[in-house]
Amino acid sequence: MKLEGNQSKLPIHRFENKTWLLIIGIIFIASTLRSPLTSVGPIIGPIRDSLEISNVLAGFLTTIPLLAFAFISPFVPKLSKRFGMELTLFVALCLLTVGIVIRSAGSILFLVVGTFLIGVAIAFGNVLLPALLKFSFPLHIGVMTGIYSVAMNISATTASGISAPIVVNTDFGWQGALGVWAALSMLAVILWLPQLKNKRSVQPKLDKTSAEKPNFLWRSPLAWAVTFFMGLQSLLFYCTSAWLPEMLVSDGMTVEKAGWMLSLLQVAQLPMTFIIPILAGRMKDQRMLVIGTSALYLIGYGGVYAGDLSFIPLWMISIGIAGGASFGLAMMFFTLRTETHTEAAELSGMAQSSGYMLAATGPVLFGLLHDVTTSWKIPMLILLVGSLLFFICGIKAGRDEKVTPLN
């Protein structure tokens, strides 16, 4: 692809002002991709009580965005090709703002509809940002992926931390705790406006071979390895976020301390979301990173399974480091295993569609197994087996290969 090859030879400092505007825009888009979701969990009780909804519907609020990711992601690359990545992301940010406002309107219908719109909007950012980084920063993919991942995780951690205080200490209620994130998405809209004039820059003409190649992704074992790697790390994350505090409480820990343990896990993720993409970008083969990450998952979940509260902080740090590393690797595989930004978008769409469908089953199956067995031991096997499957898929995804119909 001639245009992209030329782009990779252009020194970024020649376009310093434009580049910094783009980086700032990417950071703010990334900050909107998780905060509207993680703000819900800590205040699910007040939402449920205020609207008098069932626990099933309350729990389903965390699943709706995952289903939206799964169903919308395959269509994102096609819309991006037609309208350009910049315009597509701009419209998605606007839709995200609308969804946040609707969700905060204070009725069951608005809550469900707004949550679905938020999931649709975030699906666009999930798919397109890795491709945009590959196109705009071909020589700095690892650093930029790290910056984008850190921005996303900092905002996610902040959202989960301040939602409950807003409900408890202010008069805004749960509506205000959810609606406040519209200000962040609106700011992202404003900061992204300068990029709209670059619409044509991400639509280079492809030759016939390049245009057809993404169609083979669904028949590529390597693409499926990346897809399952993405899905399994998401499944582990959402199962842990949804059920870990409850497991710790059942083992004798106080509710407050269990909450702090989840916070410790999230904090442990942050440095790895920045470091791992940089390391992965400098390595041709990422299998050693996969091995280390898988070992940390097994150590952490094995410790929790044993039920000894004495070393719980250590297990949380181990799981957190693994979670940050696995997310960083998943994002990097979209770009490292493809030749062009178009293929990166296609692989990202495939992996996030099927991957989030897999992830959506995790928390539900986890809770179902607990209801049936009245124990946490059997559900915990999901996390241990998931870690082993994560390792197997990661060994394939981490090899120095590019996606083709034959691999």
Image: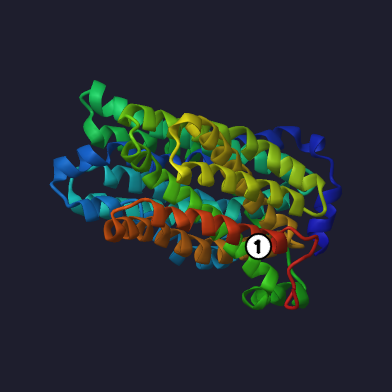
In the picture provided, is 180 more to the left or to the right than 355? left
Q: Where is residue 86 in the image (x, y as percent from the top left)?
A: 58, 51
Pointer 1 local density, CA inside 10 Å: few below 14, some 14–19, many at least 20: some
Q: In this view, does 70 lie above or below 129?
A: below
Q: Is residue 353 above or below residue 111?
A: below
Q: How is the image coloured?
A: rainbow
Instruction: Give the quarter of the figure containing the N terminus.
Output: bottom right
Residue at the outermost top position: 169
The residue depicted at 69 percent of the width and 46 percent of the height is 292
Q: Can residue 192 be seen in this view?
A: no
User: Quick one: 158 or 16, which is closer to the camera?
Assistant: 158
Q: Is residue 313 visible?
A: yes
Q: Is residue 28 above or below residue 294?
A: above
Q: Position of residue 309 (x, y in %)?
A: 44, 33
In which quadrant of the rendered view does residue 19 lie?
Answer: top right
The kind of residue on which mark 1 rests is Ile
In the picture provided, is 127 more to the left or to the right than 159? right
Q: Position of residue 229 (x, y in %)?
A: 60, 59
Q: Is residue 274 above or below residue 201?
A: above
Q: Where is residue 253 in the image (x, y as percent from the top left)?
A: 35, 31
- Disc 1 is placed on an element classified as helix
Q: How many marks?
A: 1
The residue depicted at 69 percent of the width and 52 percent of the height is 290
Instruction: Give the quarter of the figure containing the C terminus.
Output: bottom right
In the picture provided, is 307 more to the left or to the right than 276? left
In which quadrant of the rendered view does residue 193 lie?
Answer: top right
What residue sits right under mark 1 in the picture? 392
Residue at the outermost right position: 9
